[in-house]
Amino acid sequence: MTELKSYVRSLERSRRALTREDRPKTFAMAGREWDLLDGVFAPPFSATTGVALEILGLVGGGEPRFRSQGSFLDVGSGTGVIAVSAALAGCTRVVATDISLSAVKNTQMNAARHEVTDRVRVVHSDLFSALDADDRFDTVYWHSNFVLAPAEYRYETEHEAAYIDPGYQAHRRYLAEAPLLLTEGGRALLQFSDRGDLDRLHELAADCGRELNVLCRHAFPEGTETIEHILLEITVTS
Ligand SMILES: C[S@@+](CC[C@H](N)C(=O)[O-])C[C@H]1O[C@@H](n2cnc3c(N)ncnc32)[C@H](O)[C@@H]1O
């Protein structure tokens, strides 16, 4: 395993982001101010949330990219920057979910701060488990915890779930279930990284009758390294 893909290294990144003395209570992103609660994935310490906003065309009045302006499901919403930005950019209905209760509270706070609580519903959920069974979306999206950890690893903090996925168990479920939540013509998207194991992800997709198509690539510096994020579309093959 390369250093980049090391789950131990990602756990160190998680611990550092959680305990840094300069961890702010608020931060600026995309021309707006946001609340950051303890224990929640911190966009100021990683370029990846900003990359997500760019990829989806959610900054600077940009054109919508790879998503519709209709209903948007943001899985793993963290602070809520993506979900709230989607509502502010004109998505008619946004549902945000996170497995972390702190992230759910944080997303609710930022939806209130930016006055979009009428269009953003926040649900404490393991992927789709707490959603209404018949709810469907034009876009389903997850900026995931793309680093593969051993299947037997148990999270020591909620925050670690923002970085690593033991055995890709959550990714497997996402690949299988996300396309089933779409409206006709809707898109199931996954923002993945070269910190993740793309070969393993393709194997899992094939196992559950799914195909992964790269919609776009976005490279950016992180410390001394160059990281690449890719936006994948999940389609049903069988
Ligand atoms: C890389 S962070 C992205 C956070 C936020 N979307 C952003 O871009 O700043 C991944 C998020 O997925 C959440 N997550 C991890 N496993 C999950 C699961 N099984 N169900 C729902 N959310 C999950 C984490 O708690 C974390 O908030």
Image (cartoon, helix red, strand yellow):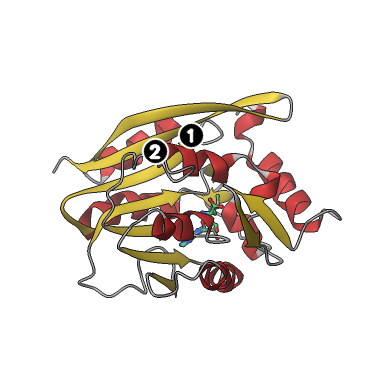
| Residue beneath the point at 34% across and 39% down | 65
Q: Quick one: 153 or 144, which is closer to the camera?
A: 144
* Residue 164 seen from this side: yes
Tags 2 and 1 in contact by the CB under 8 Å rule?
yes
174 shown above or below 199 = below
Q: Mark 2 points at which residue?
A: 201
Q: Which residue is drawn at 21% across and 57% down?
A: 180
Q: Identify the residue at image location x=36%, y=70%.
A: 129
Q: Nearer the viewer, residue 134 or 25?
A: 25
* Residue 196 % position (x, y): 51, 36
In the rendered image, the vertical position of residue 57 relative to residue 41, given as above or below: above
Which amino acid type is marked by label 1?
Answer: Asp
Query: What residue is disc 1 on?
Result: 197
In the picture provided, is 207 more to the left or to the right than 169? left
Occupied quadrant, residue 200: top left
**Residue sitting at x 65%, y 43%:** 46
Task: Choose between 40 and 85: the one closer to the eye.
Answer: 85
> SS of the residue at dot 1?
loop
The vertical placement of 126 against 165, above or below, is below
- Disc 2 secondary structure class: helix
